Image (cartoon, rainbow, N blue to C red):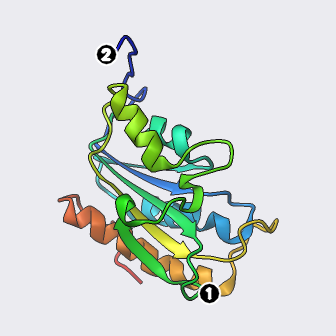
């Protein structure tokens, strides 16, 4: 409770680490976050890690992070880097706005996290981001462009490396 506003932990939180695939799986390259998260989920054995897919960033994403000690977001990004480049960085290192961490009808994830903390929400101290440089973010398609699809295994390895760095167990299936 802070200033009369209660912010409860996410309902049903049973693990301490959350991996979020962010984006829209029917908007071409925007679905890369979901594709990476699904691969990670299929390979993961650690019960302390929850993997989920979401379509909204900002406040909605912040609300989903409540109650977790650690969080990693996988998303498409457009920075002008070569298509299919993979980035693995803290959220604080990304320029504002970045991918689905912001929207015209919401706020950035960084601003939403600051708001949640000000309201007393139990949020991860640091949010990590694995992002894939993409270009077809608004084209109706359930397939990724070839270079973005080719980046999925590297992005999965980045997520697994981050999890290992947090002391969490590795994948159930050896990497490709």
Residue neighbourhood size for the residue with mark 1, other residues' Cα within 10 Å, grouped as few (<14), some (14–19), many (≥20)? some
Whichever of labels 1 and 2 marks the residue nearer the N terminus, that label is 2
Q: Is residue 129 visible?
A: yes
Indicate the quadrant where residue 23 lies.
Answer: bottom right
Percent position (x, y) of residue 53?
A: 55, 51
Quadrant occupied by the C terminus: bottom left
Q: Nearer the viewer, mark 1 or mark 2?
A: 2
Above or below for 134 versus 62: below
Residue 147: mark: 1
Rendered view: 36 above or below 16: below
Is residue 173 at all visible to an observer of this figure? Answer: no
Depicted 143 relative to depicted 64: above or below: below
Give me the disc on residue 102: none
For mark 2, what is the residue?
1
Check contact, mark 1 vs mark 2: CB within 8 A: no
Query: Would residue 120 appear left or right of 98 to someone viewing this image?
Result: left
Residue 31 appears left or right of 50: right
Tell me the residue at 46%/79% (across/down). 86
Q: Secondary structure at mark 1?
A: helix
How many discs appear? 2
Helix, strand or loop for disc 2: loop
Q: Furthest residue to the top?
A: 4
Pinpoint residue 96: horizontal percent, then vertical percent: 50, 60
């Amino acid at each position: 409770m802070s200033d009369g506003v209660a912010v409860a932990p996410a309902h049903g939180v049973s693990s301490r680490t959350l991996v979020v695939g962010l984006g829209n799986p029917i908007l071409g390259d925007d679905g890369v976050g979901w594709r990476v998260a699904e691969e990670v989920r299929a390979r993961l054995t650690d019960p302390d890690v929850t993997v989920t897919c979401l379509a909204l960033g900002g406040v909605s994403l912040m609300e989903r992070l409540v109650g977790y000690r650690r969080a990693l977001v996988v998303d498409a990004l457009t920075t002008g880097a070569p298509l299919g480049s993979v980035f693995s960085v803290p959220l604080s290192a990304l320029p504002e706005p970045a991918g689905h961490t912001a929207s015209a009808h919401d706020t950035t994830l960084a601003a939403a996290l600051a708001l949640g903390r000000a309201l007393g929400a139990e949020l991860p101290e640091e949010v990590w981001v694995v992002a894939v440089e993409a270009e077809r973010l608004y084209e109706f398609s359930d397939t990724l462009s070839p270079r973005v699809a080719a980046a999925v295994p590297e992005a999965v390895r980045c997520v697994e490396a981050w999890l290992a760095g947090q002391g969490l167990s590795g994948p159930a299936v050896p990497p490709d």
